[in-house]
Image: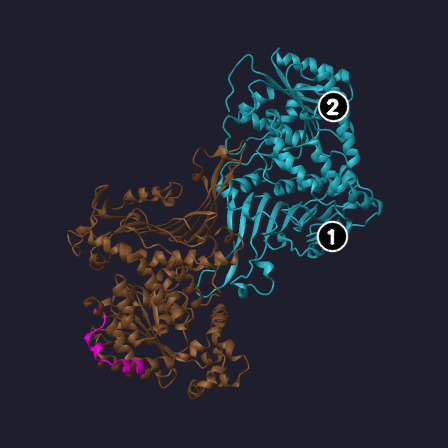
Chain colours: A cyan, B brown
Amino acid sequence: MTFDINENEPTVSITVVGASGDLAKKKIFPALFALYYEDCLPQQFTIYGYARSKMTDADLRNMVSKTLTCRIDKRENCTEKMEQFLKKCFYHSGQYDSPENFAELDQKLKEHEGGRVSNRLFYLSIPPNIFIDSVRCASLSASSGNGWTRVIVEKPFGRDSESSAALTKALKQYLEEDQIFRIDHYLGKELVENLSVLRFSNLIFEPLWSRQYIRNVQLIFSEDFGTEGRGGYFDNYGIIRDIMQNHLLQILALFAMETPVSLDAEDIRNEKVKVLRSMRPLQLENMVVGQYKSHTKGGVTYPAYTDDKTVPDDSLTPTFAAAALFIDNARWDGVPFLMKAGKALHNKRAEIRVQFRHVPGNLYNQNFGTDLDRATNELVIRVQPDEAIYLKINNKVPGLGMRLDRSNLNLHYAARYSKEIPDAYERLLLDAVEGERRLFIRSDELDAAWALFTPLLKELEEKKIIPEYYPYGSRGPVGAHYLAAKYNVRWGDGVDQ
Amino acid sequence: MASQFGYCSSSSTTFTPSSFKNETHLSSRFNIVPRKSHSSTSISLIRLRIRPRKHFQLKSSSGHPLNAVSLQDGTAGVPLAKNDMEPQGKEESLPFSQSENVGPHLSITIVGASGDLAKKKIFPALFALYYEDWLPENFIVFGYARTKMTDEELRNMISRTLTCRIDQRENCEDKMDRFLKRCFYHSGQYDSEEHFAELNRKLQEKEAGKLSNRLFYLSIPPNIFVNVVKCASLRASSTSGWTRVIVEKPFGRDSESSGELTRCLKLYLTEDQIFRIDHYLGKELVENLSVLRFSNLVFEPLWSRNYIRNVQLIFSEDFGTEGRGGYFDNYGIIRDIMQNHLLQILALFAMETPVSLDAEDIRNEKVKVLRSMRPLQLEDVAVGQYKGHSKGGKSYPAYTDDPTVPNNSLTPTFAAAALFINNARWDGVPFLMKAGKALHTKRAEIRVQFRHVPGNLYKRNFGTDLDKATNDLVLRVQPDEAIYLKINNKVPGLGMRLDRSDLNLLYRARYSREIPDAYERLLLDAVEGERRLFIRSDELDAAWALFTPLLKELEQKKIVPELYPYGSRGPVGAHYLAAKHNVRWGDLSGEDS
């Protein structure tokens, strides 16, 4: 990646709308700095923070510098690089719904662009209720006159089919489909990116990738903390919208899709949409919801979800959910895809587990006891923490006699790759700058995703389904086990460690 | 014709066919016990082995008063045991475990006890088995050789080579003393029936009238195999239990001599008394090969010409004959390594799923593979011999510098071969073998190279030769036992760069226990009558049939081996042979060291 120093080289102006927010401070500015540090950004770039707070450029730089970190493997010149980076950061204070304020921003951007071809990227790091206002103002008053203008939007993309469609419709009043970059930061995770590489560049996996060999697939997400005083936003959405309908479903689609014609964004997204559209909308009986309650352990008391001051006392919002999904196509007919997501559980992890069928007519049956399904092969892709891929195989325990156990064929990233793995936001920001849409969600994908979850979500709310309570820090409600048992599945994450 | 009688001593011809019949009948009668209960033993054996130490105790708690008595009081057990064994009809109804329960006596005789193999491998293996409580309660070990020695001298000699498993050093001294007390020595000629009769008397003394099984381990040169078998069989067979004989390679040097050896052995032994050892089959990862294939869903669908591009069986040693080339020169690397060790692994690798894990079922499948193979052609083989080499001021000798090797020897110390199995599963898949001495590394491994991904989406990440980025499954038999699967993986970071990483199972990291030596496993199997890892006569015939024409041609045409420097990667001819079949040796690709 080399960039010639050229007067005619286009400039890129990145405007972080909502620059004083948490996400901007913790993720976006550090990601931009990392890209800059690694020379991934074009030579000519400017970063603008935009928010309502009154701040000077120096104030912004001060704020940003507190959260910037350098890649641990290349600390040299870090301070110097940081100073250079901060010199390219500016701030403009304005209202999110004011075309005038955005026009002022436009003026400032033009100054920096100095008459070159200018591309502009807006990152909307703001609450959903002001999405449209900002898009309208930015599009009308601060679009690039001679280059591209792209807008990155973060979840939530609505809270059901209708509101999502309304949002899309509103966005499209001001933007073309190819200007909208809907970010799902899970798609920027290293191992999610690697999923397609594993499937499509290795001969040994693809033959196994179907109902003929795969018994079930598990998509597991857990956090070991609760809302911790920030439940206001969450309470309106719940874990299903916050994690399942987007992150886990996206991974599922990537996992299950047919081989795309090419690696082009449109080809991949076409295949993902096909998977989503082949899926049965979720039924209430295929879902278990839970909410954490307080728990005292070792003298420390952990709060219940409803103890959070920003959460109503009678909230029924699920902080845990498990679901069984099915893809009614030739490849996956009858294979349960189980999802599980929860807050305030005993550990923090995200992983994909593929459980294979048992060996038909296994010669070693007598070594396995009565339940053959407990000794099957399993492929585990651990997205976080400690990225790893491992394949559980049955192996002879060395020694005299014939005792079998399950060992792992293991690829532990920390052991194999010394480089630090970049944050998902770095990859996604870079892709947006480069116009690579593979990891962003297209409007029809989003529609299909909502179509699967909306009926269920409505039913949960209308019927006021009471979540099953589980103690803070536990393994979640036992209901998840019963749901799994119904489809002859055993959660794989309970077995390890 | 003269060579056909090479193995049988002249005295053997004095026996009339009927007299053989009587002898073999006698010995086979006592083989009925393990054989008839065969189907039940194979199951219980596996179960039994899971709980080694409790072996006998468990039985005593199974509620048979008969057994309880025999265990608590050894002498009381004797008559009961006899009663159990003698009436044939009754015996069949007895479950195997119960008859074992009375604790039959086991006598292991190492014929050639003063030899190298006995000292380095057999006695230590027996001690390890004893240490880990795998041997029956009542056992003795007899050394037999021509050297005059006392029991004490034998013990002295053995004690120097005995080692304890590093992970369990406690009571080692103590255990060693107790083991040595069970070791005895008898000096005698290998062809003297009288001397074996003397041995028999000594054995009988120790056995004290108990039901006794006898295992003979022939650790002697092949030219006296048959003499010893004759004497041992006629004079020192067990009269109350089984008699088994373990023989080591070489099993002849071509189809004829091997056939003759088998014929001669069978004059005195029935097939199921003969335990032909191939110590490679006792290696942990070779044992694990079947487990991998048949107990994992993910491998079997890939195990055919549809997905496998080629299979490589690689053996290398980093030293030459080092003054011990006398035996080797008469055989060469093809007979010494390929025709037995590598071919056996190949058969296990390529066989169809057997009906069960029983020895006969597995060996039936192995024979089928061998019989489906094309006999080797001269053009499918590259042979080499190491020459002297100086490196870093140090000079390494040529093969022919070995004083025990003729100066004009053409014996190959290296060979590479391409073999093909003409059956539905493997048609067209090259199985490449490579074996050599005095190479740059010491290793034994099986490498499976898979085909390239058809219509690979990531093609442009791989350059022009798609076959260079295929999946490989590697089973490293030694050193550092490991299984790994090479996969294409994204290099973490921005952008899309792929490389090959390993899904890895390094035994040392996963299993803290020391892996037992192959000889321990094989000796134990012989004691337990588990024949899975031993080579049946028809297997041996089939194996020789593949190699004999080639070996004869090599010798008749006096094919000159390609010379390669001591400590090198072997002759380049191996690469050309591989290239001819579109294969690239996986061990020399530079990715693995």
Q: Can residue A304 be seen at all in this image of the molecule? A: yes
Determine the chain carrying the residue at label 2.
A
Snapshot quadrant of residue B151: bottom left
Give the secondary structure at mark 1. Answer: strand
| Circle 1: residue type | Tyr
Q: Is residue A236 left or right of residue A438?
A: right
Q: Residue at x 54, y 39 (%)?
A: A197
Looking at the picture, does residue B173 appear above or below residue A41?
below
Tag 2 residue: A135
Q: Position of residue B10 (x, y in %)?
A: 19, 75
Q: Label 1 vs label 2: CA separation?
A: 41 Å
- What is the number of the mark on residue A470? 1
Q: Can residue B151 be seen at all in this image of the molecule? A: no
Give the secondary structure at mark 2. Answer: helix
Q: Which residues are magenta?
A: B6-23
Determine the chain carrying the residue at label 1.
A
Please count the marks in the image.
Answer: 2
